[in-house]
């Protein structure tokens, strides 16, 4: 029986350890005090574990090297993930956008099942065991060195140390250092799925405002390059939320971007104009600033009033047709200039990582060091929000643990 060392206790590492332990002795090393710390914060703490779309549709939501993931995603699919939880006492539910969550809305239930399966497979889980170095001899990895100074030898090693996003969860980019030492090329890690900084001077007025069922267009040089419908959130620096995070994946340096928000995407311009006329008729004797309560969230009213160019104190019955139609256009095209992206430490996911050209996509095995595999966010793969990234972590972890090949 071979001794397999798994480095990293996130979803990829836990899945790799569980799978490898069916035929091997496995030690799982986690640098932090508990497993799955990043899972605790996914899906706003509810853990968006996967997506219920047909697995063939996943690749449309994976901008980072989707073809590399064909084998992994078809070997251990989203249906397999859902069955693993549903059949082990953690029932799941499907929400908007086919996102899959535990019925309990508790990420701790997801992590709890991983821990249960690790225990069932007799995995030796060692917490607070941070790997700081590796020893290579004769083109093979011989041992890992812990921060305590201890060394752990193994026959095979699986690295699942994550990217550089959310470093407090343990994803500090250490895995890139180890991969470089093995001779692997690292595609420069960049923030993916990260909040966007907006130039608007008065953006702080909207801080904390959450919008649902709005349409966001990301424009580069005034041309739409990404569009999505869903939820977003204004912050003190700009915007965040699912559709904003996905839009951020399309932002590159040295280009001019803007974001256009359609606050009423379900209505045509004519329908929205009719709706506004109805409200204006009802509030005809009120000041304009007091006429939009039925149409907009309270926190947005003053902002829209100021952006519309109509005097806040103008009586509604005095508003011209031209002014009203300008308001319609504003509500369906509220535009902000993009200043940039927040730091990689605030990103949900890291784009970049170990070059996929140096990893066998069918096994996750290194093409340079025969007794090493990589899985999860450490590899140069990434997807949009919606459960796809966690699915990638679990799928790549599964085949890394299953397809262990040890030379005699």
Image (cartoon, rainbow, N blue to C red):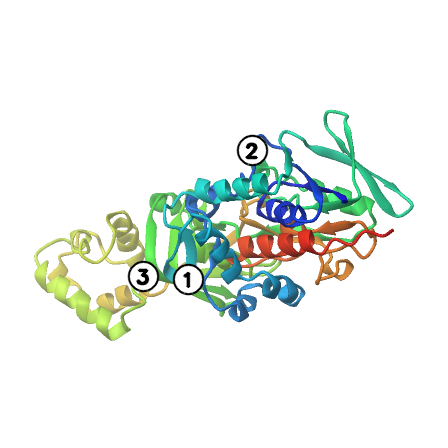
Callout 1 touching callout 2 (CB < 8 Å): no
Secondary structure at numbered mark 2: loop
How far apart marks 2 and 3 lie (CA) works out to: 42 Å
Q: Which mark is residue 55?
A: none
Q: Position of residue 110 (x, y in %)?
A: 47, 45
Residue picked out by circle 2: 34
At label 3, counting other C-alpha atoms closer than 10 Å, the crowd grade (few under 14, some 14-19, many 20 or more) is many
How far apart marks 1 and 2 lie (CA) works out to: 29 Å
How far apart marks 3 and 1 lie (CA) works out to: 23 Å
Total marks in image: 3
Residue picked out by circle 1: 98
Secondary structure at numbered mark 1: helix
Q: Position of residue 92 (x, y in %)?
A: 40, 53
Looking at marks 1 and 2 on the same chain, the residue that comes earlier in the sequence is marked by 2
At label 2, counting other C-alpha atoms closer than 10 Å, the crowd grade (few under 14, some 14-19, many 20 or more) is some
User: Hey, which residue is sitting farthest right in the picture?
Assistant: 138
Residue picked out by circle 3: 263
User: Hey, which residue is sitting farthest top in the picture?
Assistant: 148
**Residue 71 visible in this rendered orientation of the protein:** yes
Looking at marks 2 and 3 on the same chain, the residue that comes earlier in the sequence is marked by 2
At label 1, counting other C-alpha atoms closer than 10 Å, the crowd grade (few under 14, some 14-19, many 20 or more) is some
Does residue 45 appear to the left or right of 32 in the view shown? left
């Amino acid at each position: 029986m071979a001794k397999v060392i798994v480095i990293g206790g996130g979803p990829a590492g836990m899945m790799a350890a569980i799978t490898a332990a069916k035929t091997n002795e496995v030690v799982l090393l986690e640098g932090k005090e508990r497993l799955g710390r990043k899972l605790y914060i996914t899906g706003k703490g509810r853990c968006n574990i996967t997506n219920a779309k047909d697995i063939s549709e996943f690749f449309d939501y994976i901008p980072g090297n989707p073809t590399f993931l064909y084998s992994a995603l078809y070997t251990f699919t989203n249906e397999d993930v859902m069955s693993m939880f549903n059949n082990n006492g953690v029932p799941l539910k499907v929400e908007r956008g086919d996102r899959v969550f535990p019925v309990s809305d508790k990420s701790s239930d997801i992590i709890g099942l991983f821990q249960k399966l690790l225990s069932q497979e007799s995995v030796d889980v060692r917490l607070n065991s941070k790997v700081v170095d590796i020893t290579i001899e004769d083109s093979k990895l011989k041992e890992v060195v812990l921060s305590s100074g201890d060394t752990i030898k193994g026959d095979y090693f699986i690295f699942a140390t994550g990217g550089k996003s959310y470093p407090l969860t343990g994803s500090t980019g250490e895995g890139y250092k180890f991969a470089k030492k093995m001779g692997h090329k690292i595609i420069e890690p960049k923030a993916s799925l990260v909040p966007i900084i907006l130039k608007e001077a008065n953006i702080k007025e909207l801080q904390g405002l959450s919008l649902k069922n709005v349409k966001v267009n990301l424009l580069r040089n005034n041309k739409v390059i990404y569009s999505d419908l869903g939820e977003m959130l204004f912050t003190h620096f700009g915007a965040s939320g699912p559709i904003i995070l996905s839009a951020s994946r399309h932002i590159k340096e040295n280009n001019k971007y803007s974001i256009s928000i359609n606050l009423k995407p379900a209505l045509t311009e004519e329908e929205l104009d009719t709706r506004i006329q109805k409200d204006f008729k009802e509030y005809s004797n009120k000041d304009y600033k007091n006429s939009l309560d039925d149409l907009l969230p309270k926190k947005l009213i003053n902002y829209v009033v100021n952006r519309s160019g109509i005097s806040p104190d103008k009586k509604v019955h005095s508003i011209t047709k031209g002014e009203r139609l300008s308001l319609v256009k504003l509500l369906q095209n509220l535009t902000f200039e993009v200043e940039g992206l927040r730091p990689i430490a605030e990103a949900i996911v890291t784009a970049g990582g170990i070059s996929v050209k140096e990893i066998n996509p069918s096994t996750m095995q290194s093409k340079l060091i025969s007794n090493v595999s990589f899985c999860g966010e450490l590899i140069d793969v990434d997807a949009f929000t919606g459960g796809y990234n966690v699915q990638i972590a679990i799928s790549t972890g599964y085949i890394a643990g299953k397809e262990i090949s040890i030379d005699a």
